[in-house]
Amino acid sequence: MNITFIIIIIYLVGCLGVGFWASKQQTSMTEFYVAGRRLGPMVVGLAVSSTVMSGFGWVGGFGTMYNTGLHLWTITISATAGTLFSYLAMAKPIRVYSEKHNMLTLTDFFHLRYKSPAASLVATIGILCGMIGYLMTNMQALGRVGEALLGIDYNITLTVGTIILAVYCIGGGMLASAITDAFQAIMMVVASFIFIGVALYQGGGFTNINETVGSVAPDNLYFWHQSGSFNTVWALGTLFIYVFGVAAQPHVVAKFYQIQNVSKMTRCMVIGVCSYFIVGLAMYGGFASRALTVMGKFEDHSGMGDLVSTHFAMQFMPGVISGLVMGAVVAAIMSTTDGIICSLSAILTKDIWLHYFDKKEKTPKQEVFLARMFSLIVIVVGFILVLRPPTVVTWLGNGAWGMLSAVNIPLLVIGMRWKRGNKYGAIAASIVAVCVSLGMIVSRYGFGVVFPVDFTIVACACSILTYVIVSLVTKPTQNDIFPVESGGN
């Protein structure tokens, strides 16, 4: 435990160091929110990978695979495909538009694409709701994991983690976020190889592990089950949610704004997709842990799945290696949280404050001050909320991915390529996305209504259909940048 503590402290001090260094580079809002569009493919690729992974994989993923089996790899494969899709569908055009039109946020794209203040405002409200919930979820995870790893009170670990995030996010903006994310991705990749190797060694190899788990839970050997929650419908829904949903997450798309050279995007894509897939494979450690429990070598974790990865590391790995692996747990959470903080700050600063309330011309120094002020506001409000999280915030956290997907898949992913989509379809789809998402979130978590499919699928299907139908039945809106070809297609 002492070695683990030391390694985590070294990692956190490194984050602080990056923050102090990056703070000296902040000369404008463009520098603060998109790192001056000057990062290389290695940094951006790794940063995208770590941002997509989040704390779910290392904390929840191991426990989920421990309890329910290999079906989690359906999510891993779908999210890997989603990371690839986000590059192929979004990365190059969004990067070109961002520089040509000085775009810093997704709302900037909506202004450019739909030429409608109403469409941009409704979409921004939906994105804010989703990202606030997402921020709360990750900040809560930061406190819980620190509590589990070090045995320190939740409030103390949350406070320390929040201070670290505040220093490097407020000081260094997206530059510090991207560099620390890249380092965090390397930690996770190294830890993944270690985890898989140790799990296979302790469990006696793939065949023995699979046979052992199969002897007590045959369904756990399959990517989806013949019946129950993880059936074929669930698998198809998961494929849809993650393949298209990754490209709809603002903190992921923001990374594409940052690469220096569009010609390096292919290299960036290969690095990002491969590193994510490697980390996703490490979830097999949770499955191997279940086999070790059946063999009598590992304590039963059926009621404490979130502790599987940390307890496995502490029991079966040497101190230094265990510390590295558990440092990767913290890294997974922080790599997503810092991206969300910067994205929320950008929305509040540029899309709301400067757009609606303070339209005076600002000097670069004043822009950086505002960016840092709103970053601080995001962090402080987030910290206060997760100390005693209101019920509605917890609900939003559970539904954050779905709400962001329901808003951004039609307006961003489809709207990027389908020129017939117009402002009327964007406004209608955003309203439907928010209303259906909130309605199903409240029904599910407030009243215990069980839906036959994930509410994300329903919300996305409704918003996509609305976007397409309304765009087709209304008059095309002219846009010099996204011209509608003759024939209306």
Image (cartoon, grey):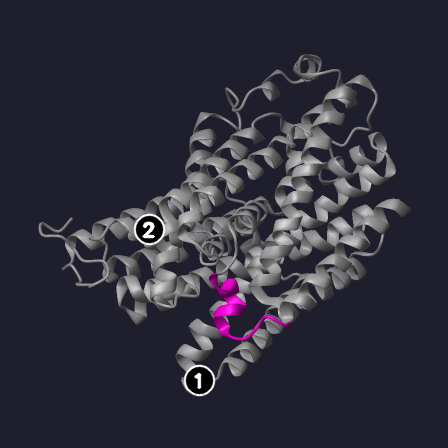
Residue 174, image quadrant: bottom right
Magenta-tinted stretch: 24-37
- Which residue appears farthest toward the right when viewing the image? 2
Earlier along the polypeptide chain: callout 1 or callout 2? 1
Q: Quadrant of residue 291?
A: top right
Tell me if residue 391 can be seen. Answer: no
Residue 383: x %, y % from top left: 68, 65
Mark 1 and mark 2: span between their CA atoms?
30 Å
Return the mark for residue 358.
1
As drawn, the label of residue 410 is 2
Category of crowding for the residue at label 1, using alpha-carbon neighbours closer than 10 angstroms: few (below 14), some (14–19), many (at least 20): few
Asked if labels 2 and 1 touch by Cβ distance under 8 angstroms, the answer is no
| Quarter placement of the N terminus | top right
Residue ID at (76%, 53%): 11
Q: Is residue 279 left or right of residue 414?
A: right
Residue 29 drawn in magenta? yes
